[in-house]
Every structure is written in structure tokens, then in C-alpha cells.
Amino acid sequence: MSKPATETKTRIIEAANHLFYLKGIKAASVDAIADKAGVTKRTLYYHFRSKDELITTYLTSRDQPNVDAFSVFFDAQEGTLETKIAAIFTGIANVASHPKWRGCGFQRTVGELADKPGHPAIEAASQHKQHIEAWLHTLFIQHNLKEPTTVARQVSILIEGALATMLIHRNRDYIDQAGRAAITLIHCYLDIPSDTATDKVEK
């Protein structure tokens, strides 16, 4: 693909990212996306065969950046594994507290496609969530945590629940409490005596 064509496709993806996240995949029309990207509808369909393909690309394009954001939260925090994992939840809470936050784009898209279980965008969302879980799994192996596969899944569930609950209540305390639950969980698999674990969580 030539450079101009690549740049055009990038503009379309960026426009789709903005409008799909802001309005939802059903409310954001192909015409509106083409207009925001500064291209004709025909040009958009030259790069994407259908709106469904564009929706799938929208989610795929958000995969690595989201993982990278979690990684930044984790790496920027000094201290123990527990405090670094808690920092992920703090980072999520800070982002989700912004007035323009509209929830998790993956969760929202899958919700809008609930009547289309075979849609490729649902698979893209599933792969992203598995990517997050695999990243956590790698971290837990590196930190010699017991049963890293189990803990990675449980922490990923806490993250998903925190995102969904924040969208409903718009109260960051739900994310903060999910972070505290993650700390408690990790303490269990570090085999730290219960009294010590309680003291650290309270601090």
C-alpha cells in the first residue's frame, strides 16, 4: 500500500476511533466517519469492505495501546508487586474520572453486538481481554506468584468489573475497592501471614 493510501486509512481509523467511542458503533454512521476523516464514502469503502470490518479494526487498533497504558501504570509505580498492581487500578480510576470517559470501548461494543455472537469485532474484543490476562500472567510468573494463571484471570475479572461498575455509578470508589481486592488476592498467593497482609492493605 502506498504512503498516501496508508495515511488515508490511518485517518479513517482515527475518525472511527473517535466517533465509535463517543457515540457508539450503531449511532456513528459511515457517512459521519468519512466526513471526519476528510474522505468520500467511496474512499472509505475502498479501504474497508464494510462497516463491520471498520468496527473490528477500531477495536484491534485499541488493543496494544490499552495494554501499553496498563504497563505504564505498573512500571511507573515503585515497590512491591501488590502496590504496582494497585497502581493499575489507580490509573484506570484517574482515566475513568475524566468527563469525556465513556466506559470501556470493548465492553460497550460487545454490548451493542449482543445479538450478533459471531461478529468479528466480538472476537477482537475477546482477544484484547485475553491479551491483558496474558500480560498479567507474565508479570505474575516474573514475580514468582503461586498459581499465576488463576491469579491473572481473577485480577482481569476485577479490572472488567471495575470498568463496568464505574460506567454505571460514575464513582471511582468502585475501582479503588477493586484495587484493594486485587491486593488482598495477591497476598493470598504470596502466602503472607494473614495479620501481615491485613496491616499492609490498611496502609
Image: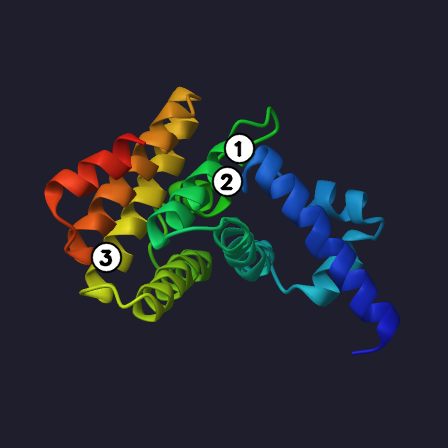
Category of crowding for the residue at label 1, using alpha-carbon neighbours closer than 10 angstroms: few (below 14), some (14–19), many (at least 20): few
Q: On the picture, is 25 further left or further right than 6? A: left
Identify the residue shown where x is 24% and y is 63%: 145
The number of callouts visible is: 3
Residue 155 percent across, percent down from the top left: 29, 50
* Quadrant assignment for the C terminus: top left
Circle number at residue 91 = 2
Q: Nearer the viewer, residue 190 or 56?
A: 190
Disc 3 to disc 2: CB gap under 8 Å: no
Residue 55 percent across, percent down from the top left: 56, 54
Residue 169 percent across, percent down from the top left: 38, 21
* Quadrant assignment for the N terminus: bottom right
Q: Nearer the viewer, residue 110 or 105?
A: 105
Helix, strand or loop for disc 3: helix
Q: Is residue 12 above or below residue 167?
A: below
Q: Residue 161's image quarter?
A: top left
Q: Residue flagged by tag 3: what amino acid is it?
A: Val
Circle number at residue 151 = 3
Q: Is residue 202 above or below residue 6?
A: above
Q: Gap in Å between the C-alphas at discs 3 and 1?
A: 24 Å
Q: Is residue 91 above or below residue 7?
A: above
Q: Which residue is mark 1?
A: 94
Disc 3 to disc 1: CB gap under 8 Å: no
Q: Is residue 173 visible?
A: yes
Disc 1 to disc 2: CB gap under 8 Å: yes
Q: Is residue 113 visible?
A: no
